[in-house]
Image: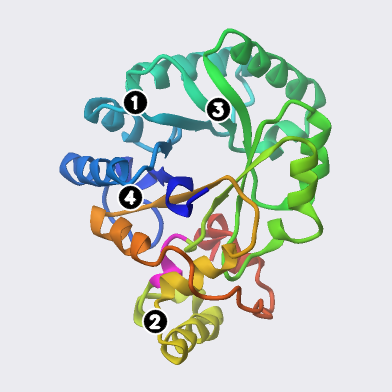
Amino acid sequence: MNLIKKISIGTAQFGMNYGERNKKALSFTKIRKILTYARSIGIQNIDTAFNYGRAEEKLGIVGVKNWKISTKFSKIPSNENPVYWIEKHLKKSLKRLKIKKINTLFIHDFNSINKNEKKAEDIMKFLKYLKKIKLIKNIGISIYDPKILNRIIDLKSIDVLQAPANIFDRRIFQNKNVEILKDNNISLEIRSIFLQGLILEKLNNIPKKLNDYLIYFKKIEKLSNKMNTTKISIALSVLNNQRFDKLIIGFNDENELKEIVENIPLKTKNLKPFFIKKKNFLINPYLWNTK
């Protein structure tokens, strides 16, 4: 499939300030322009979440009935019945989005249910019921670390896995993970290809909390100059010759999407991985606010 058609529009910045680069949520005008251009080039998928601020509400107002919408539920409060909680929030999502069904409903915090076998069983049973009554088409799980892949396979009901991959983090493409997913009929969606946009940033815009890793951002800049190519092309090179089904990318305006399109088809070969000391902090944005 054409890489452009594999793109799914990430929407965290539609509803809130998200990541290190986005200080406020996007306006309705920008959202409309992004979606209008995306649709004109064959993109059909949108990725959102219950807890992306007003993202779902804004999408509903703009109108997304003809899109394939995936959403996520995050950590379920320990004092809540998980089935009732999911049902309540799914109904709210459908109402906000003004649609009748979800393409993929993702479990966003797998670790929170992985620790409780009974809770995991109840949730999976309910998600299968939602599939049966066609409120959702697929059951998905969003992960940070492929080490838990075998546990996910054991659930036997997962249709889609969403995982990070970028020039600093290629774990999902290692250890035959992709083959394991294929053998179990699980689709793979890639997110964080630009590491919340920082891989494309100017060096003086890299946050101080990542100063220990500045040398690796400098390497990308040097490669870009040496190869006379864009940072986008270098970042996307990780996907060369890899099997995956969707690529989640967020945009601040339609021009950012146009820049991506200009770098497709991929012209930069898959570059050798960087050796990065103590890279866990770098590749997990949820840890950045702990420093």
Q: Which residue is mark 3?
A: 105
> Residue, x 65% and y 11% (percent of image)?
129
Is any atom of residue 207 visible in this view?
A: no
Left or right, residue 59 beside residue 51: left
User: What's the CA distance linking mark 2 and mark 3?
Assistant: 37 Å
Question: Mark 1 and 2 residues: CB-CB less than 8 Å, in contact?
Answer: no
Q: Nearer the viewer, mark 2 or mark 4?
A: 2
What are the residue bounds of the magenta stretch? 196-200
Q: Nearer the viewer, mark 3 or mark 4?
A: 3
Q: Nearer the viewer, mark 1 or mark 2?
A: 1
Q: Nearer the viewer, mark 4 or mark 1?
A: 1
> Residue, x 39% and y 81% (percent of image)?
203
Q: Which residue is mark 1?
A: 66
Question: Mark 2 and 4 residues: CB-CB less than 8 Å, in contact?
Answer: no
Against 206, residue 55 (above or below) is above
Q: Which residue is mark 4?
A: 17
Amino acid type, residue under disc 3 in the picture: Leu
